[in-house]
Image: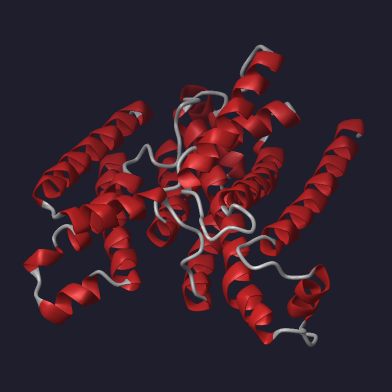
Amino acid sequence: MQKNNSYRLSFAILVVILLICFFANISLGSVSIPTRDIFNSLIGSPVENESWKHIIQNYRLPKGITAIIVGSGLGISGLLMQTLFRNPLAGPFVLGISSGASLGVALVILGSSIFGGVLASLFISQWGLVLGASFGSFLVLLAVLVVSVKVRDTMAILIIGLMFASITSAIVSVLSYFGSAEQLKQYIFWGFGSLGNLSWTDLQILILLYVIGILISIRSIKSLNTLLLGENYAKSLGLNIKHSRFIIIIATSLLAGSITAFTGPIAFIGLAIPHITRQVFNTSNHTVLLPAVFFTGAIVMLICDSISQLPNSDFTLPINAITALVGAPVIIWLLVKKRKMIF
C-alpha cells in the first residue's frame, strides 16, 4: 500500500514536471513572446500581436506535442525491445526499422536523379520523404515478421534484425558514393532529426499511428511481465511466445517506424529512457514502468528540444546531438550511483 502511494506521488510529480517543461518549450524560440500572450494564444483569447499567435499555434505547439510523442513513443518501444530480448543494449531500432527508413529516404534523395523534372521534385518533398521512410520501414518490418513466425529463438530475431540493418546500411553507402554533394547534404540533414517540420495534418496522422502503438503496448503488459521470468518459465505459465513476440514487434514497429518517418532517426532516447526510469522507480513491473517511461521520455525530449533551440537565436542545434549530450552523462551517473543495473 505504501509503495502504491509512493508511485502515485511520483506520477503526480512527473505530470507537473511535464506541464512545466511543455510550457517552457513553447515559450522558447528565436522570437521572444510575453508569457501572458502565450497563455492567451493557448486558450484562444486575443493576443497583442497576431504573428505571435500564428507562431505559437502553427509552429511551437505542434513541435511541443511532437516532442512528447517522440520521447514517450521511442522510450516505450525501447522498453518493449529490452524486455523481449532480455538485452539492456536493445533499442527501438534493433530490428532494422531505422535502417529501413534511412534506406527509403536515401532512395528518394540520392536516387532522385533517376526521376526527371516534376517527379523528382515530388519525391523530394516532405511527404515524399515520409512515404519513402515509411515504405523502407515497412519492408524491413515485413521481413522481420516473416522471420519471427518461422524462428523459435528470440535472440535469433535480434541477430537477423541487425543483419537487415547491415544490408540496408551497405545499400545506403553505395547510393551515397554515387550521390551529388547537394543530395548528400540533404540526406545528412534528414539524419540529424527534426521536430519542427510537422504541420497539423502530419501530426494527426502521426498521433493516430502512435495511439494504436500505445494501445497495443498496454495490451502487452501482462506478456512483458511474464517474459521477464524467462521464455521457458513463461511457456509453462501458458504464454504463447510466438503470438506475444509478434504483438510486441508490431507495437514497436508502429511507434518507432512512424516517429522515424515523420521526424527522422532520433538516437539515444529509446535506449536510455527505460534505464533511467528503472533506476528512478526501482522496479521491473511493466504496469508501473510503461506509464513511467511515457512521462520520463516526454520530459527528457522536451528538455532536449528546449536546449537545441538556442533561445533568442535563429540557429537550432541537431536534436540527435543534444539527446546524446544530455542523456548519456545522466545514465552514467545513475549507474555509478546505483552500482547495478535493474532489469
Left or right of 257, for residue 336:
right
Left or right of 216, for residue 13:
right
The residue at the point 63 percent across, 62 percent down is: 29
Q: In which quarter of the image is residue 67?
A: bottom right
Work out whether residue 269 can be spotted: no
The residue at the point 56 percent across, 43 percent down is: 75
- Residue 291 location (% of width, % of height): 69, 47
- Residue 113 location (% of width, % of height): 10, 65
Residue in the foreground of this view, choosing between 88 and 57: 57
Residue in the foreground of this view, choosing between 152 and 100: 100
Q: Number of labelled discs?
A: 0
The residue at the point 90 percent across, 39 percent down is: 5
In this picture, is 9 found above or below 163? below
Work out whether residue 214 can be spotted: yes
Q: In which quarter of the image is the C terminus?
A: top right
- Residue 125 location (% of width, % of height): 29, 72
Q: Quadrant of residue 30?
A: bottom right
Q: Which residue lies furthest to the top in this view?
A: 339
The residue at the point 73 percent across, 30 percent down is: 280
Residue in the foreground of this view, choosing between 238 and 324: 324
